[in-house]
Image: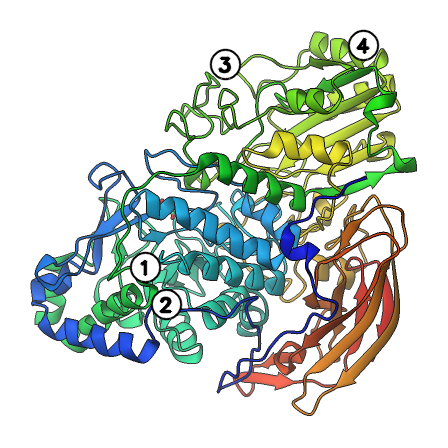
Amino acid sequence: MQMKLWPAVALATAVCVAAHAEVPDFPLDFSLTSTAVNAFGAAAAHQRAGSLVSKMTLDEKLQFIHSEYAMSSVPGGGAGYIQGVSRLNIPDLNMVDSATGSGSTSQASTTFPATIALAASWDRRLSTEFGKQVAIQLRAQGFAMGLGGGTNLAREPRGGRLFEYLGEDPVLAGEMLAERTDGTQRQKVIATIKHYAGNEQEHNRGGGNSQIDERTLREIYLLPFEIAARSAQPGNVMCSYNRLNGDYACENAHLLNDVLKNDWRFEGQVQSDWGAAHSTAKAINAGLDEEEDVGSTVYLTPAAVKQAIANGSVSTARLDDMVRRKLYVMIRTGVMDDPPKASTIDFAGANVFTQAVAEQSMVLLKNDNNQLPLSAASLSRIAVIGGHADAAVLTGGGSGNTRDPVTGSFAGCGGLTFGTSTGCSWWTNPWLKLNVPIVSAIHALAPAAQVSFAGNSDQQTPFRAYTQQEIDQAAALAGRSDVAVVVVAQPAGEDFGDLQSLSLANPSNQDALVEAVANANPRTIVIVESGNPVLMPWKDRVAAIVEAWYPGEGGGKAIADVLFGKVNPSGKLPVTFPMHDQDTPTWGQNGAFEPDPVYAEKLDMGYRWYDAKNIAPMFEFGYGLSYTHFAYSGLSVIHRPDGAIDVLFNVRNDGRVAGAEVPQVYLGVPYSGEPPRRLVGWEKVGLNPGEARRVRITIPQRMQSVWDTSRNNWRYVPGGTVYVGASSRDIRLQGS
Ligand code: BGC
């Protein structure tokens, strides 16, 4: 069997060591896979920004800190723009959503996989490349700032925007975000990290008060932002809609001034989410640098800020600081001297990349008796059932969506008549030649077999429940086929609320469909398209399960390649898949969402919750199978004089096909309140059959530390237990 690996993984060196960049206050020591480059050195950029500010008039400064919602008025569409100052050669700054390609614009874009899929690849270099590929399209469309980079954590597994984020672990999310940020900014596009902070649910999204104690904030929810802000220096941090411990995030002095700008020494700008500003002087003095106006909120308008300056509630020095920060970012990333120009996009090339990301991200959850990979030679009849697998794959909705490269309509709408309230159902366009539906992709790999589809072919109401007749027809087809591939899907999107349950909904009877097919054919393979964990009451009755996430426009081919073993799956879950809704930390008595969520589980979020409470998940964090096996041996733990620990061990591919493994290092920190284990490092290692590598993962001192509230600082806690595993629960080696 051939195995496709993203080159970075294939070329992974035998010893993977993080280099160390000293951070004066407390070493964080996360380094990027490449050295961050700045078009302009920081000191020179500061000096030049300062000199420009001194030449700007008050009105020019004021126009620089407020953006109108401008989709219709910005050339090429977009989510907002800041008008430049032509007499000083300061260009306009157009910005656009970029979670999975360029969204919130009328321009065509590639639909990349959802970022939760990217997290499931655990491949840092893939994340850098993801940031780069998205940025190339943004620049070609005239955008100098991308609003991708979501990294709220999966505290609420039913969260409506989970697909836009990077899972439940702060270190995994932070490092993947840092890489993505760097990949984007190297293309001279300002990157955003968002939504800062405590924005873990859609429920009461306009102003719910997230109540999070300081230690939990520092160790969990702020950590991905800190890792990205310190190591990749994004130009832009977007503060969120919610309140945090009483104050709106965009006027929260602790979040913006104390932590971000002072503790982390962030030199870029803070921008409000769209309509998330709630005051003028309070917000500005708390650290907000730019307001994104949606028409109804008008707090940082020229008139309002002028008045605040006149009455002394905002200083001119602070206004200068706001403007200088934006100029500094524009200079440092290269946007100032080389603003984006419209150019042609290589959609075919980008499509190849999206497929590679999807392939690296798929997680093989179950594979009884090696039912996968399928062998085309032994199959004459293949049934493909449900999930509109004859037409398209699912994407997430809202600002994390994209426009398709042919029609320029939202990825879900282009060329399709699938309908919902917004006119789009978020399915990538099947008429686009680049986007091969699963049925066709399977047929291409098994040309001699008869590939038949059953399910809901109704494009008008794609999410309606399957009729009993459709279920019966699907089961009959499965019964006369050699294998049945059932596709189930869980739609989600911004502004559509959180999911009520992790049960498959929309269509609501997908579980019944799977059960009927599994009864008819013991060789039933389930493909899940989702941005959230899903419950699988049929898990024990099907032969194999693949989590494909929202796989983007190359998803059909990627799924077929995994099914037929052209690709050996190597994704690992970035979120826990629980057995029941009731097992999750946020379900409470009856699953009702708290309008003002209290993060009462503190540090025990995600896998830490299941470990601390001894609840068996259905599939744990970090879990994922392969078509080969990996053996772990030879652990040594070396303490370095700087307090860091080197964890060394061997990983051997002891199966018959090439594959990639993600060995994970967890630490049990001996300190009150800490969870049994927390992720502190990992590597993705590609290995040929019989090949072994010695892997070295360095755990900086900071990753062995806890937030000490009595000192309001980090406290190094030596003497932890080191666990090396193939998942958070499949621990293979242990040392101290
Ligand atoms: C979302 C942001 C997005 C912005 C602009 C808001 O509703 O929360 O993530 O960047 O819209 O489209």
Q: Could you give the CA–CA distance between mark 4 and mark 1, rounded to whole angstroms?
A: 56 Å
Residue 460: image tag:
3
Q: Residues within 10 Å of mark 4 (few under 14, many from 20)?
A: some
Which residue occupies 61% across, 85% down? 715
Judge by depth and name the residue closer to the eye, 46 or 81. 46
**On the image, numbered disc 2 is attached to which residue?**
252
Q: Position of residue 671 (x, y in %)?
A: 72, 80
Q: Residue furthest bottom?
A: 641
Q: Give the residue type that dot 1 points to.
A: Gln
**On the image, numbered disc 1 is attached to which residue?**
271
Q: Residues within 10 Å of mark 3 (few under 14, many from 20)?
A: few
Which residue occupies 51% across, 63% down? 178
User: Which tag, 3 or 4, sits closer to the chain's start?
Assistant: 3
Which residue occupies 44% across, 63% down? 244
**On the image, numbered disc 4 is attached to which residue?**
476
**With respect to residue 49, does 716 lie above or below?**
below
Q: Give the residue type that dot 3 points to.
A: Gln
Q: Residue furthest right?
A: 369
Considering the numbered disc 1 on the image, is that residue within a helix, a strand or a loop? strand
Judge by depth and name the residue closer to the eye, 89 or 527. 89
**With respect to residue 547, does 624 lie above or below?**
below
Q: Could you give the CA–CA distance between mark 3 and mark 4, rounded to whole angstroms?
A: 25 Å
User: Which tag, 4 or 1, sits closer to the chain's start?
Assistant: 1
Q: Give the residue type that dot 2 points to.
A: Asn
Q: In which quadrant of the rendered view does residue 648 lie?
A: bottom right
User: Which tag, 1 or 3, sits closer to the chain's start?
Assistant: 1
Q: Position of residue 290 (x, y in %)?
A: 26, 60
Considering the numbered disc 4 on the image, is that residue within a helix, a strand or a loop? helix
